[in-house]
Image (cartoon, rainbow, N blue to C red):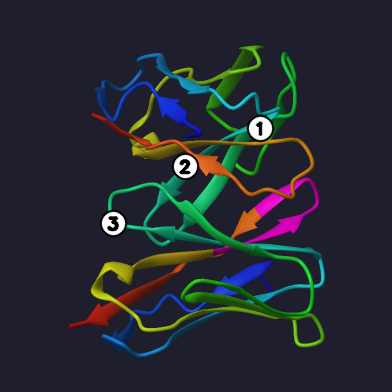
Amino acid sequence: DVKVTQSSRYLVKRTGEKVFLECVQDMDHENMFWYRQDPGLGLRLIYFSYDVKMKEKGDIPEGYSVSREKKERFSLILESASTNQTSMYLCASEPSGHGYGYTFGSGTRLTVV
Amino acid sequence: QKEVEQNSGPLSVPEGAIASLNCTYSDRVSQSFFWYRQYSGKSPELIMSIYSNGDKEDGRFTAQLNKASQYVSLLIRDSQPSDSATYLCAAFVGQNFVFGPGTRLSVLP
């Protein structure tokens, strides 16, 4: 069974902290994505990657960065957490070609206080 | 116009009825569409994909694509309370998929 694993289900961090959200997939997928999901705003793309060491900005990259040193791992970094980054963060992956749909991780609910 | 639009609902149907969920899209959208189901507090899970005009059936689910009218639908036959969830439509735009805001479905026992 294919899997996308996010390291934490719930996180509480303080304003100004540097926060790392980890995502690992075991499906040998080329494409990986980070979304945030907020009530009334839906799913918004933060960053994506089509290959190791490759990254592209999505629709809302401000305040975030990413790292993809290995094919299976895609990390989202909040450089200096702020309260408006309180959200559900979802990692997803898919094979190259865009014809297969995403497999999502279980999500990380981040609260910044 | 947003690229992918859905009625947010809630859509309420009695158990055993057909639930019809609709999604409209803009000219920028390529012809790849996916439906995801998301239970409250959970992540989205892929239900179906559709690329060609017409209907595609999978069990109790039927996806319908009408390119001329720019809409895609998901029909759920014999709706069950366990089908109560938010249904997200996704369409390929540019480099990636864009998700609609989702329609909340409530199946009443």
What mark, if any, has residue A39 been given in the picture?
none
Q: Main secondary structure of the magenta part?
A: strand
With B23 as the anchor, is B29 left or right in this view?
right
Foreground of the two, A33 or A14: A33
Q: Nearer the viewer, mark 3 or mark 2?
A: 3
Q: Position of residue B87 (x, y in %)?
A: 45, 67
Which residue is labeled 2 in the image? A36
Which residue is labeled 1 in the image? A48
The magenta-colored residue range is B89-97
Judge whether A75 appears above or below B2 on screen: above
Q: Is residue A25 magenta?
A: no
Q: Are marks 2 and 1 on the same chain?
A: yes
Looking at the rendered structure, the secondary structure element under dot 1 is strand
Name the residue rendered at 79%, 72% in the picture. Answer: B52
Snapshot quadrant of residue B77: bottom left
Name the residue rendered at 64%, 24% in the picture. Answer: A28
* Amino acid marked by disc 3: Ser
CA neighbours of label 1 inside 10 A, class few (<14), some (14 to 19), many (20+)? many
Q: Position of residue B6 (x, y in %)?
A: 53, 75
First in residue order: circle 2 vs circle 1: 2
Q: Are marks 3 and 2 on the same chain?
A: no
Which residue is labeled 3 in the image? B40
* Quarter of the rendering occupied by the C terminus of chain A: top left
Name the residue rendered at 75%, 22% in the picture. Answer: A51
Name the residue rendered at 45%, 19% in the picture. Answer: A22
